Image (tube, rainbow, N blue to C red):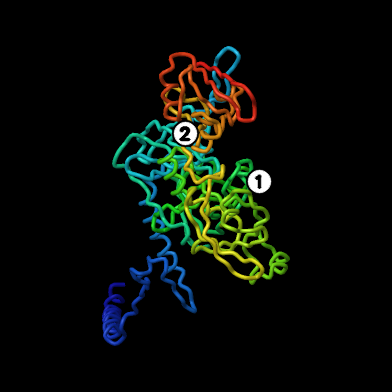
């Protein structure tokens, strides 16, 4: 055995030396192969939404990188300014004086560093106590500054400074197909971010059909929105607020691909009015309208099947005084084209009584322009000061009231406050008072405006007596309630 090994050892050694020599020669002659993982560099200008890429072979990695980066940036900037809102609501009072309460929740958006928050009216409607939880879990009590059921927008205030807040974007420049993020608290899941695209603009879904002068010109998106998202933010990929999430269309009560937001440009006007006047100052044309269809366009010799047909004009209205007529077809307000009723309503809703707008319209096949000075719903250019009675010792009074206009004081020969609306199940609702009641005295003391009304209620100790009258009924009326 030993002798055999001695015989084969030289052969084995020679073979190993030959193998090593072959490897060394191969490495010298043949270069090793290099595997390259190619990653496309995204140029800085790609983050500008106006930049587009055109290629015969679209790059999925490039597109996803751009979108992902913008989603991260927008989420980081916008999420701290979105809050969770919890509302305790008075449901009813029983015969023995006990109260039944319920709760509802939603979202809100901080729009200023000193604590102003915009949300939906239906989130805080009939709220007896409203609490706001920030993204960092700090909690505050909120007071209602004002509400506007006609757009489902409400303005709240918390007492704090240096808060993270969102900046308003321009909803007019928003394009169908553009990426957007919805941020809110669906099912109480605070600070939830979902993504989608703008599916349509100026969409009417008839959720405010019971509201006189209701405005529906929603941004429609396919970003997932569920119960609890109401009042939350719809932002673009720059993180700017371009809408307030308000509603979904669903067969199940949960998200099915269709969500709707109030455009930011309309929201800004609403909250300015609520801060300045306590209610929305609506400028009106004073017309009844319908959309133009193919048969109307042909009959009126219109160049396109679009626009808004004036079917009736209210006497003494802004439209009547400007010379607009039944049969005119409005296609433009100032520099903005209007092709449908929601677009017209949204644009006009951004103006106050006394503001002048330029109306472009077709009459007898010819294009014309008129300057129209908008009026309020009582056909004057006055700004109507109204206030929703919330907070203080009359928290559940449940009344919206406004000062009498100069014309009303002259006609009625009195000063006072007009009741515009009364909340169901509120203190005043249980007195059987009706909207339209004109309050002239509180506890036998004359009052001239809403500020004096609020002060008189605050100063009353136990019982409050409203004295006044209705225009359509003879005689004086009294309504009494306990504080």
Q: 461 or 376: nearer the eye? A: 376
Q: 409 or 223: nearer the eye? A: 409
User: Which of the 4 quarters of the picture holds residue 322?
Assistant: bottom right
Q: Which of marks 1 and 2 is nearer the N terminus?
A: 1
User: Can you give x and y, in whole percent of width and height, for residue 108 in the image?
Assistant: 44, 42
Residue 215 visible in the current orientation? yes
Q: 226 or 392: nearer the eye? A: 392
Q: Quadrant of the N terminus?
A: bottom left
User: Residue visible at 50% across and 41% down?
Assistant: 120
User: Residue visible at 51% across and 16% down?
Assistant: 482
Viewer-side label of 1, 2? 2
Mark carried by residue 350:
none
Read off the residue under disc 2: 387
In the drawing, does residue 261 fall left or right of residue 11?
right
For mark 2, does the 10 Å Cα neighbourhood hold few (<14), some (14 to 19), or many (20 or more) residues? many
In the drawing, does residue 194 fall left or right of residue 216?
left
Relative to 380, say whether 70 is above or below: below
Relative to 130, say whether 347 is above or below: below
For mark 1, does the 10 Å Cα neighbourhood hold few (<14), some (14 to 19), or many (20 or more) residues? few
Q: Which element carries disc 2, helix, strand or loop?
A: strand
Pointer 1 with pointer 2, Cβ within 8 A: no
Read off the residue under disc 1: 251
User: Exactly how many numbered labels are in the figure?
Assistant: 2
Most extreme residue toward the top is 96
User: Can you give x and y, in whole percent of width and height, for residue 425 in the image?
Assistant: 58, 25
User: Can you give x and y, in whole percent of width and height, for residue 304 in the image?
Assistant: 64, 70
Most extreme residue toward the bottom is 29
Residue 194 visible in the current orientation? no
User: Can you give x and y, in whole percent of width and height, for residue 180 in the image?
Assistant: 47, 56
Q: 464 or 267: nearer the eye? A: 464
In the drawing, does residue 428 fall left or right of residue 392?
right
């Amino acid at each position: 055995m030993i002798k055999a090994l001695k015989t084969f050892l030289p052969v084995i050694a020679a073979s190993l030396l030959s193998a090593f020599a072959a490897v060394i020669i191969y490495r010298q002659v043949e270069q090793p192969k290099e595997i390259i993982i190619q990653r496309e560099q995204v140029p800085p200008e790609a983050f500008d939404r106006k930049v587009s890429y055109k290629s015969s072979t679209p790059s999925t990695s490039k597109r996803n990188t751009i979108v992902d980066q913008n989603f991260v940036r927008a989420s980081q900037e916008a999420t701290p300014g979105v809050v969770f809102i919890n509302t305790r609501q008075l449901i009813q009072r029983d015969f023995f004086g006990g109260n039944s309460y319920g709760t509802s929740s939603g979202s809100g958006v901080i729009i200023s560093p000193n604590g102003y928050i915009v949300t939906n009216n239906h989130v805080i409607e009939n709220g007896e106590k409203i609490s706001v939880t920030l993204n960092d879990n700090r909690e505050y009590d909120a007071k209602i500054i004002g509400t506007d059921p006609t757009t489902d927008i409400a303005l709240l205030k918390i007492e704090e400074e240096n808060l993270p807040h969102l900046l308003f974007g321009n909803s007019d420049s928003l394009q169908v197909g553009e990426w957007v993020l919805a941020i809110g608290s669906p099912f109480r899941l605070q600070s939830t971010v979902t993504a989608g695209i703008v599916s349509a603009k100026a969409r009417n879904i008839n959720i405010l059909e019971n509201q006189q002068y209701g405005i529906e010109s929603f941004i429609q998106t396919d970003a997932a929105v569920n119960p609890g998202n109401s009042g939350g933010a719809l932002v673009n990929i720059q993180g700017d607020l371009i809408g307030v999430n308000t509603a979904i269309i669903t067969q199940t009560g949960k998200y099915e691909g269709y969500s709707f937001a109030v455009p930011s440009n309309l929201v800004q006007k609403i909250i300015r009015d609520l801060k300045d006047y306590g209610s929305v100052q609506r400028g009106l044309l004073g017309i009844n309208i319908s959309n133009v269809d193919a048969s109307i366009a042909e009959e009126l010799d219109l160049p396109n099947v679009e626009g808004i047909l004036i079917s009736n004009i209210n006497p003494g209205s802004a439209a009547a005084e400007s010379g607009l007529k039944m049969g005119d077809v409005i296609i433009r307000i100032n520099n903005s084209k209007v092709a449908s009723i929601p677009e017209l309503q949204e644009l006009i809703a951004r103006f106050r009584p006394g503001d002048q707008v330029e109306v472009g319209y077709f009459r007898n096949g010819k294009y014309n322009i008129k300057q129209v000075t908008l009026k309020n719903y009582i056909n004057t250019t006055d700004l109507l000061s109204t206030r929703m009675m919330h907070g203080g010792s009359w928290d559940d009074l449940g009344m919206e009231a406004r000062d009498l206009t100069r014309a009303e004081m002259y006609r009625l020969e009195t000063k006072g406050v007009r009741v515009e609306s009364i909340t169901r199940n509120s203190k005043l609702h249980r007195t059987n008072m009706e909207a339209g009641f004109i309050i002239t005295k509180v506890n036998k003391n004359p009052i001239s405006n809403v500020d004096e009304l609020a002060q008189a209620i605050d100063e009353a100790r136990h019982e409050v007596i409203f004295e006044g009258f209705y225009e359509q009924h003879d005689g004086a009326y009294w309504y009494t309630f306990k504080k």
